[in-house]
Amino acid sequence: MANGLDEVVAAETVLSDVDGLGGRLTIRGHSLADLAGRRSYAQVAHLLLEGFFDDLPEDAGLKESLGQARAEVFERLRPVLGALAALDVYSGMRAGMALLPDRKTLADALRLIAAPAVLTPALLRMGRGEQPVSPDAQADHAADMLRMLKGDTASPALAKALDTYLVTVCDHGLNASTFATRVVASTQAGLTSAILAGLGALKGPLHGGAPGPVIEMLDAIAESGDAATWLRAEIDCGERIMGFGHRIYRVRDPRADVLKAVVRKLVAAGGAVGRLAFAETVEQAALDVLRVAKPSRSIQTNVEFYTALLLEAAGFPKEAFTNVFAAGRVCGWVAHAREQQLTGRLIRPQSRYVGPLPELVA
Ligand code: COA
């Protein structure tokens, strides 16, 4: 039996491919390097959604449709924002998304794709006693998310950095949250139900919940003053080093390199990424410690390590990092849900019973 379903192929997809030995990510025929920093999030969302909705607008039109969807989400959910803001920011976002119509149209899909970018800034602002900022339907998706967070226009360098991040995490094969999404979609439930499954799976620290703990780790190491000793002690206690290791990649996660380059550019543009040099030292120490502690396994830097630095520099508090991950991954989830509904069957694997047998009654 495949514990953890390693090596099991559970879907055929035209959406993305993760080459764990070559360290390559392909999204609809494009390498990640061709997309990240070169195409906007709306353009990549278009690439992912192509073929799954008859009324999908032309490539250039999706930016506007996504902007309208942000405005609609804000108007629909405005009356309940106060109640949502009383929850932690991830639960508030998820609860807000649960209130969106549970159907399968393009309008439903775009509202779901827009929702994390609208709800996260609104709930963060309300959590600190500020008024939410309405979306600007004409703006670029990432730039608008930052404007709604800060209340004024973000620098082009920061908007570009966040846009590149959202593209970098938009889809990644049959990861846990995408699989969860496809399982629910395979029952022909609506898109909201499917996306809620993805949101549930993303939250865990072994998946999208890792970047917040990366910041906590950097803080703790800075305080301890000795990275290698701190990291070794963690491993000796059976803890995992956040931001390292991957089920599929046996080499460096290509997304880590893309995001590291983005963080470097932000530093060059005068962005507040004070701890890049320190993080690079910690990264090297972690790789050295992991190589010695787990010699039989190649444990490399994953996407979450530099995600943490980038999102911190963009002004998101660490408790909202998984929300921003969801803001990128949600278009991949929607595309996978539609692909499953249009081309797949009900996903229904089997389990092997290893419990006690009923007592035989004489
Ligand atoms: N730190 C320390 N040890 C790690 C590790 C890490 N980050 N990642 C894997 N390992 C070790 C495990 O402890 C285990 O060691 P053992 O065989 O001595 O018990 C071995 O590697 C295999 O672990 P397993 O859980 O089977 O590997 P996996 O393929 O399921 O792991 C992750 C994938 C992502 C769950 C794992 O690398 C991890 O927990 N990473 C930290 C969390 C993280 O960054 N998540 C974001 C992923 S993008």
Image (cartoon, rainbow, N blue to C red):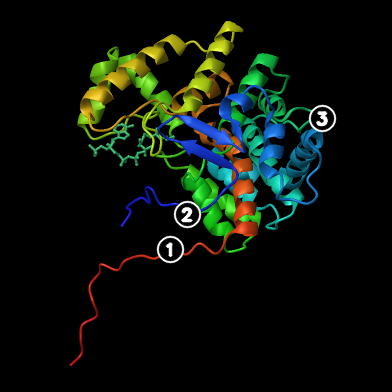
Per the model, the C-alpha gap separating discs 3 and 1 is 45 Å
Q: CA distance from mark 3 to mark 2?
A: 39 Å
Residue 202, position as x, y percentages in the image: 49, 43
In front of the other: 41 or 359: 41
Name which residue type carries label 2: Ala
Q: Kindly report which numbered mark, 3 or 2, lies closer to the viewer in this rendering.
A: 2
Considering every residue shown, the one lying at the far bottom of the view is 362
Residue 215 vertical position relative to residue 187 in the rendered view, above or below: above
Residue under label 1: 349
Residue at 74% x, 38% y is 70
First in sequence, mark 3 or 1: give its number. 3
Mark 2 highlights which residue? Answer: 10
Nearest the camera: 254 or 200? 254
N-term-proximal mark, 3 vs 2: 2
Q: Nearer the viewer, residue 23 or 49?
A: 23
For residue 138, the mark is: 3
- Element assignment for label 2: loop
**For the residues marked 1 and 2, what is the alpha-carbon distance in whole angstroms?**
9 Å
- Between 181 and 257, the one lying in front of the other is 257
Ligand 1 picture quarter:
top left
Q: Is mark 1 within 8 Å of ligand 1?
A: no
Q: Position of residue 29 (x, y in %)?
A: 61, 36
Contact check, label 3 and label 1, Cβ < 8 Å: no
Instruction: Choose top left, top right, bottom left or bottom right for residue 354.
Output: bottom left
Residue 102, by quadrant, is: bottom right
Label of residue 157 in the image = none
- Crowd band around label 3 with a 10 angstrom C-alpha radius: few (<14), some (14–19), many (20+): some
At label 3, the amino acid type is Gln
User: Which element type, helix, strand or loop, lies under badge 1?
Assistant: loop
Is residue 27 in sight in this rendering? Answer: yes
